């Protein structure tokens, strides 16, 4: 039976976290090599006492630098496989239109759409532009998951999957590329091959 599978974009499909250290260095804010997102944030917040520098880096990561993000290994192939099986795949993302302190005023929705095209996830017999949905708040994103009748949704944020408005008819998969912390009772996948297995199991049992 064909189902609708929803997928989050940032840090589920697009590997964005690794860009923070690179951007912070490029902005001349110090040495950040090898640091993950939380470590970069910690260093910047202690440097200026508030989140201004951090927000500046975020604005660049999701704006001008976004095109450098990679696709998580295996994600394209898994999505292609679902489409071949006749499933509907939707990308549903919470994203503001503009980044903080971004002088280039990059349209973050357009930057993401361009990235999806360049990575052959949109077009090329894969998803169409209408299959990519942006909402500017988390609440609105969860509402879209409900409106689109997603039967499965994959996201790296607990806050989305355990949202009070998250539909009961939708099965959540928490994507944890850094490993399963074991602190939640959701179905967890630490890689896209694990995502594929979890979804396969869910559909078998359906
Ligand atoms: Mg995400």
Image (spheres, grey):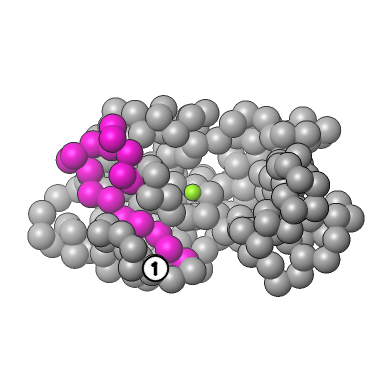
Number of callouts in the render? Answer: 1
The foreground one among 160 and 47 is 47
Element marked by disc 1: loop
The residue that appears at 28% across and 35% down in the rendered structure is 164
Q: What span is in magenta?
A: 161-177
Position of 191 with respect to 53 (left or right) is: left
Position of 129 with respect to 5 (left or right) is: right
Residue 6 in picture, x, y percent from top left:
35, 45
Is residue 171 rendered magenta in the image? yes
Task: Determine if residue 32 is in view.
Answer: yes
Q: On the image, which quarter does residue 165 sit in?
A: top left
At label 1, counting other C-alpha atoms closer than 10 Å, the crowd grade (few under 14, some 14-19, many 20 or more) is few
Instruction: Note whether 103 is above or below 68 in the view shown.
Output: above
Is residue 113 rendered magenta in the image? no
The residue that appears at 31% across and 55% down in the rendered structure is 173
Position of 20 with respect to 178 (left or right) is: right
The foreground one among 30 and 200 is 30
- Direction left: furthest residue: 205
Residue to which mark 1 is pinned: 181
From the Cβ of disc 1, is ligand 1 less than 8 Å away?
no
Residue 117 in picture, x, y percent from top left:
58, 46
Task: Determine if residue 84 is in view.
Answer: no
| Predominant SS of the magenta segment | loop
The residue that appears at 49% across and 69% down in the rendered structure is 178
């Amino acid at each position: 039976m064909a189902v609708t599978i929803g997928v989050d974009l940032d840090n589920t499909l697009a590997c964005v976290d690794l860009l923070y250290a690179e951007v912070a260095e490029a902005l001349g804010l110090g040495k950040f090599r090898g640091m993950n997102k939380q470590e970069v944030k910690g260093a910047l917040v202690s440097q200026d006492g508030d989140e201004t520098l951090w927000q500046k880096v975020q604005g660049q990561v999701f704006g001008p630098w976004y095109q450098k993000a990679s696709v998580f290994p295996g994600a394209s192939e898994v999505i292609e496989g679902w489409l071949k099986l006749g499933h509907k795949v939707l990308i549903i993302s919470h994203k503001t239109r503009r980044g903080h302190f971004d002088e280039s005023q990059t349209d973050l929705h357009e930057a993401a759409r361009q990235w999806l095209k360049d990575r052959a996830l949109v077009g090329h017999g894969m998803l169409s532009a209408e299959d990519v949905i942006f909402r500017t708040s988390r609440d609105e994103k969860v509402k879209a998951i409900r409106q689109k009748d997603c039967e499965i949704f994959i996201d790296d944020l607990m806050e989305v999957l355990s949202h009070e408005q998250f539909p009961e008819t939708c099965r959540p998969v928490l994507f944890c590329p850094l490993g399963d912390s074991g602190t939640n009772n959701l179905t967890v996948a630490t890689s896209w091959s694990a995502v594929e297995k979890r979804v396969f199991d869910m559909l078998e049992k359906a």
